[in-house]
């Protein structure tokens, strides 16, 4: 009867909570900051509109792509691929032991875990072009500087994801081998690595794709590969050559992505 | 507990011929996990050579914990665990790893490396004795080890599954592979935590018969946890009952009737 005598629910909760004064302040602050950023970044619609004819000119000069330098360009694209492959593979191989040190369940000591984790995040947060400039300055211009950059870049990416895969591995096969006195290295390889393998293969393929993409721009700062050719063509207003380069880069990146997609399907 | 003589014939010989030092002796063992009540205190029992000892007790009584404490996979708080003459609680980490090689361990489930072949998994039993890449997978193994692993697999009747991936096996088959791996270890004793849980009655019996046969033929000590009272009663030589944080039963199996065991809970 309490239910019957109870008033029907006349007060329906409103759709939105009343906005608090804090969110109002935050919103105003954001608008202010965004306007300031537009100003700082010299964002200008008029410049964009003025630039449109230039874009049209460049595009029209791109066709037909130049075929005269196609062969040297193809060679350079191939070097880019080689750089990416060497950099990614060495990076992946070096990432594996680091990942075991940086995974909570396999690290020999919490301190080791912290130090390796911190180092890997540091490596990851420094952009690859900064690494490229650093390596060009230390080992000179050319693909080797690019390879070193890609190695470091791959480690920053892979060591972290490998470590996460290792932490997610089922602990029970490992415990079973621990119970019978198997050594740490043996257990890591035999019980943990197979568990983490699909994830590791996936990250590795992804880092290979990533290496191919970033190796294209490394040439811009002199770290070898096709990027340098692209910069030179653009600076010399040879947009037809630039078009050839861009097409070949597209074929390369697309090809590698298809290949790794196929490998992913086969392995997983 | 009274000792009925009937039905005690086959076990008596062994009880009399009990060797001086048991394979495992546990004395006054206590354990509590951080932030929890005591799991058990003052546990004492022995595992003699060539015998099967069953631990029974209700869920959460601490049977699995006790088994893990016996090889310090879980650190006991107080008390002593001796493997042969060797006091386990006094060992350094390195010595402990060595001591663990003397004990084969069969867990309840999920203990095989699913992505590797059955034979590789059996081979891993030798990782306690030897280190290194040649024992990582059957394809890399030295001929003699590979043959030994195959032989162990044959002992549990799974030689035809040698190159199957371990995650394609049924529960009972995995359990047998785990036993084969324990055999490969050539240990003096096998600890088995509910080796027959989730197995059908027939596979369960097969595992139990296998463990019993091995213990009698190869003088292995088998320490197992079981919830199946008829297994405990018919396949073990001694039953240790864990309840209310302590050992409330420790008797030869022929002295315990099935109904007594069931009433233990
Ligand atoms: N790693 C752990 N950390 C904290 N508490 C634990 C841990 N493992 C087990 N426990 C607790 O210890 C008690 C005993 O657990 P244990 O697994 O040893 O019981 P059990 O006798 O094997 O039970 P079951 O018959 O269900 O297998 C339980 O209350 C459990 O919650
Ligand atoms: Mg248990």
Image (spheres, rainbow, N blue to C red):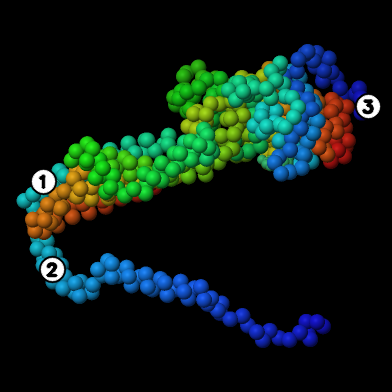
Residue A2 visible somewhere in the drawing: yes
Residue indicated by mark 1:
A71
**Disc 2 residue crowd, few under 14, some 14–19, many 20+, Cα 10 Å:** few
Q: Is residue B97 left or right of residue B33?
A: left
- Tell me: residue B225, above or below residue A243: above
Q: Which image quarter: residue A39?
A: bottom left
Chain hosting mark 2: A
Q: Is residue B187 left or right of residue A261?
A: right
Q: Considering the image in quadrants, where does the N terminus of chain A appear?
A: bottom right
Tell me the distance, in whole angstroms, between the alpha carbons under discs 1 and 2: 29 Å
Circle 1: element type: helix
Q: Is residue A92 left or right of residue B66?
A: left
On whether ligand 1 comes within 8 Å of the CB at mark 2, the answer is no
Residue indicated by mark 2:
A54
The reply to whether discs 1 and 2 touch (Cβ–Cβ < 8 Å) is no
Residue B33 in the image: state x and y as whole percent. 71, 39
Residue B198 in the image: state x and y as whole percent. 68, 41
Please name the residue shown 61% across and 80% down the image. Answer: A13
**Disc 1 residue crowd, few under 14, some 14–19, many 20+, Cα 10 Å:** few
Please name the residue shown 79% across and 27% down the image. Answer: B28
Please name the residue shown 18% across and 40% down the image. Answer: A141
In this view, the mark in front (1 or 2): 2
Tell me the distance, in whole angstroms, between the alpha carbons under discs 3 and 2: 104 Å
Q: Are marks 3 and 1 on the same chain?
A: no
Residue indicated by mark 3:
B2
**In the rendered structure, which disc, 1 or 2, sits on the residue that comes first in sequence?**
2
Q: Which image quarter: residue B73?
A: top right
Residue A202 in the image: state x and y as whole percent. 40, 46
Residue B115 visible somewhere in the drawing: no
């Amino acid at each position: 009867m309490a239910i019957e005598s109870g008033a029907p629910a006349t007060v329906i909760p409103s759709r939105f909570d009343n906005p608090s004064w804090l969110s109002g302040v935050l919103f105003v602050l954001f608008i202010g900051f965004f306007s300031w950023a537009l100003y700082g970044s010299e964002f200008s619609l008029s410049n964009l509109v003025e630039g449109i004819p230039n874009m049209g000119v460049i595009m029209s000069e791109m066709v037909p792509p130049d075929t005269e330098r196609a062969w040297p360009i193809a060679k350079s694209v191939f070097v880019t691929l080689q750089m990416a492959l060497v950099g990614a593979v060495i990076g992946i191989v070096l990432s594996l032991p680091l990942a075991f040190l940086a995974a909570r369940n396999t690290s020999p000591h919490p301190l080791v875990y912290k130090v390796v984790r911190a180092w890997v995040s540091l490596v990851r947060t420094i952009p690859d072009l900064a690494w490229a400039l650093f390596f060009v300055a230390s080992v000179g211009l050319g693909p080797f500087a690019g390879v070193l950059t890609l190695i470091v870049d791959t480690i920053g990416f892979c060591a972290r994801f490998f470590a996460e895969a290792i932490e997610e591995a089922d602990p029970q096969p490992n415990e079973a081998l621990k119970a019978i006195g198997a050594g740490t290295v043996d257990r890591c390889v035999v019980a943990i690595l197979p568990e983490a393998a699909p994830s590791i293969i996936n990250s590795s393929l992804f880092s290979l794709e990533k290496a191919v993409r970033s190796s294209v721009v490394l040439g811009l700062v002199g770290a070898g590969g096709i990027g340098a050719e692209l910069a030179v063509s653009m600076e010399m207003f040879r947009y037809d050559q630039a078009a050839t380069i861009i097409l070949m880069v597209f074929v390369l990146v697309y090809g590698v992505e298809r290949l790794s997609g196929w490998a992913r399907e086969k392995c997983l | 507990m009274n000792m009925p003589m009937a039905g005690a014939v086959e076990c008596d010989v062994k009880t009399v011929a009990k060797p001086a030092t048991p394979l495992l002796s546990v004395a006054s063992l206590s354990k509590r996990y951080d932030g929890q009540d005591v799991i058990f205190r003052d546990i004492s029992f022995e595992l003699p050579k060539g015998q099967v000892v069953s631990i029974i007790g209700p869920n959460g009584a601490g049977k699995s914990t006790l088994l893990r404490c016996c090889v310090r996979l879980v650190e006991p708080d107080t008390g002593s665990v001796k493997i042969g003459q060797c006091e386990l609680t006094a060992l350094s980490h390195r010595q402990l790893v060595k001591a663990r090689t003397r004990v084969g361990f069969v867990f309840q489930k999920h203990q095989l490396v699913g992505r590797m072949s059955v034979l590789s998994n059996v081979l891993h039993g030798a990782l306690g004795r030897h280190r290194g890449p040649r024992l990582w997978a059957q394809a890399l193994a030295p001929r003699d080890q590979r043959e030994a692993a195959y032989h162990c697999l044959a002992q549990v009747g799974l030689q035809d599954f040698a190159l199957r991936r371990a995650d394609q096996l049924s529960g009972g088959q995995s359990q047998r592979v785990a036993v084969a791996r324990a055999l490969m270890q050539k240990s003096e004793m096998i600890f088995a935590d509910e080796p027959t849980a989730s197995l059908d009655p027939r596979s369960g019996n097969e595992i139990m018969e296998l463990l019993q046969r091995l213990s009698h033929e190869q003088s292995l000590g088998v320490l197992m946890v079981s919830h199946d009272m008829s297994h405990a009663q018919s396949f073990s030589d001694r039953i240790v009952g864990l309840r209310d944080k302590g050992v409330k039963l420790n008797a030869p199996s022929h002295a315990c009737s099935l109904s007594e065991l069931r009433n233990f809970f």
